[in-house]
Amino acid sequence: QRSQEENPTKMSPHFLLPSATILLLLLLLSPSTTTAATSAVLDTDGHPLRASTNYYILPVVRGRGGGLTLLPKNDTASCPLYVGQEFQEVSNGLPLKLFPVNPKQKLISLSSDLNFVFDASTICVTSTGWRLTLEEATGRRLVGIGGTVGNPGIQTVSNWFKIEKAGSGKYDYKIVFCPGVCEFCRPICGDVGVFVEKDGKRLLGLSDKPLLVKFKKA
């Protein structure tokens, strides 16, 4: 009879499985939640940026123009318009919304493909979504408008930008053109910086020196 009885001091392995499983789940889930928290882009109040919400994009360095707005490249024509900086440092510029490549994504994360769209109307018959354009006379790649929202692929590859951490401040970032929405496309990536025109206009385009920016909720 004793040989058929279980040893009361020996714990059945069935009782160990739930604890081991819970521990494994904790080990697997903890890094992902930490990564999600650290990859979120933050506004000047320390809150994660939310999709489809209005923000101002302001320069980190003071004394070199204001927030982002729309400007004509020269004063002889009102269109097309390009993304640039306000002349006055105290001006926030125009509010804009960010749209992730994944329409279900609610928060804006670092290194993710985004559409930047000004929440404004213009006299030019075009959308206010950002789009990288080529200035044939100089070879400069300037940030213009006319980009559409969504529809990732070869037809829209010029419309996608990313936000990356930069600078020493907690809320300092840079904007990058390096779309990942087209598997077989080979875009020339670069940081978005500033070109200062002869008349003082500050236009955004791909540059060796990125414009450090911060996001202020409108």
Image (cartoon, rainbow, N blue to C red):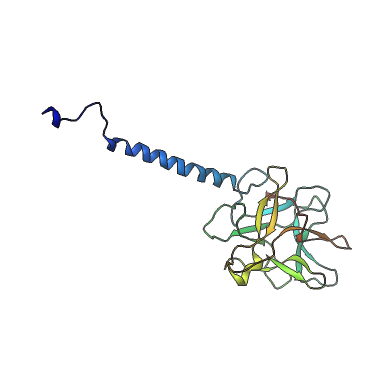
Q: Residue furthest left?
A: 1
Q: Residue furthest front?
A: 3
Name the residue: 29% across, 35% down.
Answer: 15
The image position of residue 109, as x and y in percent, is 59, 52
Name the residue: 44% across, 40% down.
Answer: 26
Residue 155 visible to the viewer: yes
- Quadrant housing residue 13: top left
- Quadrant housing residue 149: bottom right
The image position of residue 74, as x and y in percent, is 84, 68
Question: Of 131 and 16, which appears nearest the observer?
Answer: 16
Please state if 169 lies on the left or on the right of 1 as rendered.
right
Instruction: From this view, report whether residue 128 is shown above or below residue 63.
Output: below
Q: Assign the N terminus to one quadrant of the image.
A: top left
Instruction: From this view, report whether residue 148 is shown above or below residue 26.
Output: below
Q: How many marks?
A: 0
Q: Residue furthest right?
A: 198
Question: Of 21 and 103, which appears nearest the observer?
Answer: 21
Please state if 5 lies on the left or on the right of 100 as rendered.
left
The image position of residue 2, as x and y in percent, is 13, 27
Residue 218 visible to the viewer: no
The image position of residue 102, as x and y in percent, is 54, 60
